[in-house]
């Protein structure tokens, strides 16, 4: 039925598996379209009580967007790609069934945002989360931020100067080495040097 994902229903549980292990389950247009179709079927199935999202193989849930596909996109196509990804992840947030992300390894970029769109995240000791795009001054393309129960019902806030997405978890924003606890660094003002909040 699908080429890039696996969809299985067993004992009231729907399993959606990103099935591109050779590309670390990178998210491309075809994957997102198949996810969109499968989520519509899950939402309308009264027998399904919970959704489990996982990645094929043991290395990643998803290593972000498929850069190979994105390299050939013009600006308008890239924006449409990001907007469609937001729509798909919003569908996960809005599902009537609870959703669980199983994270065996990498969950980077869009893969991290996919995990954040789920209600529950179960990560192995080898799991690695990250939003590498913020280091390039690019905001997360698919609303990467912690999501409260019931999802976010407001449009994404603009990113502050410096390119770091507002509301991202502290672990993703790059804290000072001594800041193992406490808030992440706030975006620095132009007239003030950065200061570690735990000093």
Image (cartoon, rainbow, N blue to C red):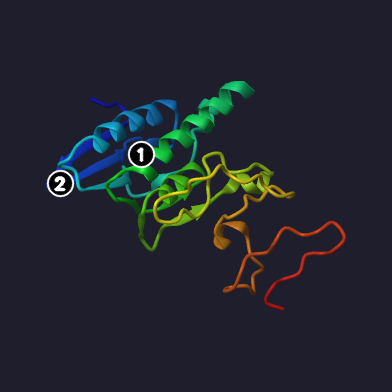
Task: Give the image location of residue 193, x and y in percent.
Answer: 82, 64
The one of 184 and 107 positioned closer to us in this rendering: 184
Q: Which residue sits furthest bottom?
A: 199
Q: Quadrant of the C terminus?
A: bottom right
Residue 136 lies in quadrant: top right
Left or right of 95? Residue 189 is right
Label 2 crowding class (10 Å Cα cut-off): few <14, some 14-19, many 20+?
Answer: few
Q: Which residue sits furthest right?
A: 191
The one of 162 and 105 positioned closer to us in this rendering: 162
Q: Which residue lies at the image location 61% right of the left edge and 68% below the top edge?
A: 183
Alpha-carbon span between mark 2 and mark 1: 26 Å
**Marker disc for residue 21:** 1
Residue 103's place in the image compared with 86, above or below, is below
Residue 75 lies in quadrant: top right
| Mark 2 secondary-structure assignment | loop
Task: Give the image location of residue 15, x and y in percent.
Answer: 24, 43
Residue 149 lies in quadrant: bottom left
**Marker disc for residue 90:** none
Q: Quadrant of the N terminus?
A: top left
Q: Which residue is mark 2?
A: 12
Kindly report which numbered mark, 2 or 1, lies closer to the viewer in this rendering.
2
């Amino acid at each position: 039925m699908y080429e890039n994902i696996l969809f299985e229903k067993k004992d009231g549980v729907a399993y959606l598996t990103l099935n591109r292990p050779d590309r670390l389950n990178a998210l491309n247009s075809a994957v997102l379209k198949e996810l969109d179709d499968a989520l519509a079927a899950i939402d309308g199935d009264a027998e399904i009580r919970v959704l489990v999202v996982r990645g094929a193989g043991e290395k990643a849930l998803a290593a972000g967007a498929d850069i190979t596909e994105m390299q050939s996109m013009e600006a308008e196509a890239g924006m449409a790609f990001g907007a469609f990804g937001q729509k798909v992840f919003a569908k996960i947030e809005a599902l009537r069934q609870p959703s669980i992300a199983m994270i065996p390894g990498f969950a980077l970029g869009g893969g991290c945002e996919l995990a954040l769109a789920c209600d529950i995240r179960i990560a192995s000791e080898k799991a690695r989360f990250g939003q590498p795009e913020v280091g390039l001054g690019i905001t997360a393309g698919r609303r990467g931020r912690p999501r409260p129960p019931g999802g976010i019902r407001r449009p994404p806030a603009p990113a502050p100067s410096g390119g770091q997405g507002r509301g991202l978890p502290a672990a993703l924003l790059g804290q000072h080495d001594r800041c193992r606890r406490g808030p992440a660094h706030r975006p620095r003002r132009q007239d003030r040097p950065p200061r570690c909040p735990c000093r």
